[in-house]
Image: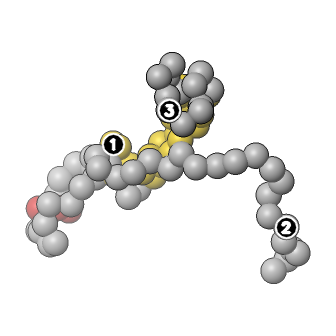
């Protein structure tokens, strides 16, 4: 994983979770999949910008409310 991509989306009209027509923001990890544990050629290849990591679940959980309290500095 080398980063996070943020998507803005909307729930469709046929949602069964009560979120019909509402907007959401979700995050998906990005990176380059590794195909070998070690390779001499790895350091000679041009850098590859990471895309979405296929199969990784996106983070789409949240809720309204104030952030948790904390005494700073900790």
Residue that label 3 marks: 16
Instruction: Give the labeled residue for mark 2.
Output: 69
Where, by quadrant of the figure, is residue 24 drawn? Answer: top right
How many numbered marks does the figure carry? 3
Determine the residue positioned at 35% across, 52% down. Answer: 56
**Quarter that holds the N terminus:** bottom left
Labels 3, 2: front one:
3
Q: Quadrant of the C terminus?
A: bottom right
Query: On the rendered structure, is 65 left or right of 36?
Result: right
In-front residue for pair 3/26: 26
Secondary element under disc 1, as helix, strand or loop, is strand
Mark 3 in CB contact with mark 2 (< 8 angstroms)? no
**Is label 2 or label 1 in front?**
2
Rendered location of residue 45, percent (x, y): 17, 53
Residue ID at (35%, 43%): 52
The residue identified by callout 1 is 51
Where in the figure is residue 18, as x and y percent of width and height?
A: 59, 33
Disc 1 crowd, CA 10 A, few/some/many (<14, 14-19, 20+): some
The 10 Å Cα crowd at callout 3, few under 14, some 14 to 19, many 20 or more, is few
Name the residue rendered at 53%, 41% in the picture: 26
SS label for mark 3: loop
């Amino acid at each position: 994983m080398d980063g996070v991509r943020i998507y803005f989306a909307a729930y469709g009209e046929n949602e069964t979770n009560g979120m019909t027509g509402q907007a959401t923001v979700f995050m998906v990890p990005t990176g380059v999949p590794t195909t070998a544990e070690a390779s001499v050629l790895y350091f000679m290849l041009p850098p590859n910008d990471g895309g979405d990591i296929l199969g990784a679940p996106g983070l789409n959980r949240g809720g309204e409310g104030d952030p948790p309290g904390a005494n700073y500095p900790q």
